[in-house]
Amino acid sequence: MDVAGKKVTVVGLGQTAVSVVRLLLREGARPFVTDSGNGPKLTPYCEALDALGVPYETGGHSEAAFEDAAVVIPSPGVSPTLAPIEAARARGSVVVGEMEFAFGYCRSRLIAVTGTNGKTTTTELLRALVAACGHSVVLAGNNAFPFSAAVMIEPAPEYIVLEVSSYQLETARTFRPWIAAVLNVTPDHLARHGTVEGYAAIKARIFARQESSDIAVVNFDDPYVRGMAACSRGVVWPFSVKDGKDGKDGSDGSDGNDGIASGLYVRGGEICLGDAVVARVGDTRLPGRHNLANVLAALSVMRAGGFDWDKTLEGLRGFRGVEHRIELVASLDGVDFFNDSKSTNIDSLKVALESFERPVVLIAGGQGKGSDYGVIRELVRQRVRKLIVIGEDAAKLDAAFGDVVGVEQASDMDDAVRRAAGVARAGDVVLLSPACASFDMFDNFEHRGRVFKAGVEGLKGGKDAELVLGDPRMRKDSRSCHG
């Protein structure tokens, strides 16, 4: 898109807006940024625009912000149907999302992943696998590093792994990833997309511009995603953790390849392609069948893309997970400690508990959201051997589960870790999965998770421990959280 000398209005002020402004300035455009909000949360972004000499407004969208704008770029969190954006479109402005705009400047091979759940784990894993194969790679998109920043990197990386949201796909027109993957579709963002079917149709747009030389990776077990295969003109690679014909779990020894003409599937403890065993379930440290689906998606990308398979499997075996998402922290005296601080609701706790067949010593609690904990009583009875509660909702958790599992209340996270370690036995899992927000005791869920990890690290003195807190930056962060 030729924007040289043209006014471009960016709607919504944040990290993505600042990144796209830098790209616009590089291309000779005249950017203007408008945001309906105000307050200290915008201060760092306002300061960034001041340093760049870019005009902006906060506290509302003025008519002047959109006057004479050749292009309007709504940030991902801003609906493209917002009244001033619709008015600008009616006057002839081109309305294009940040992802679509940045795609025009992408010089790397693009691997894009979308889905309701699992995007972060899958894209982080893909970055690790591509890097393990010896290629330069950057992770960008619906995370902490906008696509518009990634396309400005010099020299351009060989590959960009892009986490893609439905909001970003709404305005996609020419977006064409070399490999695109859809992980799953469950009801989400319906206030914006209307129905699950409408939401799925938006997700399917990731395949819309693909050609015969491209690759579409689809979850054969998800009916919405399975139907998206027809949306791509590329080579379709399905994957399945189940038998594609009768829905049986491949762990029962059934042939998971039924109904799958090509692609990866699970048969018992094996990952197969056709009749060949190409990997094993034990090659991944990530717990749970939801993570096995994420692993199959990533391996499908690597296999379909022709990456070195031995190096891919080596990278998979070394991947420890995403921080704060059922992240393996340490193995201590036969007990595995997992950090799932990202769990801020009951559904997240349910997924975490379902990920383990071993007894769980669970640390849960925090600032509750008014949900009914009773909906997972049976799961807690089956999976949890001891419950350590913390935070504002400690008493509510005790009331909900105290008659099905032993409960102890801890004064803080260090106390919770010590109590959990004290009752855990060899073969158990100690799991931090709060099912609550963190703001009663911590700055955010990241802070909560790092304090947990620091507490686990504090247990290692004189013990037979395999600590996976090896990143020096993590050790520094953990100490600062303690302080």
Image (spheres, helix red, strand yellow):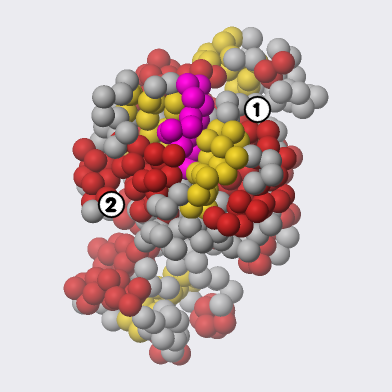
Give the number of the mark in front: 2 or 1. Answer: 2
> Label 2: which residue?
481
Secondary element at image label 2: helix
Q: Which residue is drawn at 54% across and 19% down?
A: 281
Relative to 179, is 40 above or below? below
Q: 293 or 252: which is nearer to us? A: 252
Q: Which residue is drawn at 19% across and 73% down?
A: 51
Left or right of residue 103: residue 254: right
Determine the residue located farthest toward the left in the rendered image.
51
Left or right of residue 25: residue 263: right
**Span shown in magenta:** 420-433
**Is 422 inside the magenta-drawn segment?**
yes
Relative to 375, is 267 above or below? above
Q: In this view of the protein, can residue 433 be seen by the observer?
A: no
**Is 457 inside the magenta-drawn segment?**
no
Q: 40 or 453: which is nearer to us? A: 453
Secondary element at image label 1: strand
Q: In which quarter of the image is the N terminus?
A: bottom left
**Residue 343 placement (x, y as % from top left):** 52, 49
Residue 357 position by quadrant: top right
> Label 1: which residue?
240
Could you tell me how far apart the alpha carbons at marks 2 and 1 are, in whole angstroms? 41 Å
Q: Residue at x 24, y 41 (%)?
A: 475
Q: What residue type is labelled 2?
A: Cys
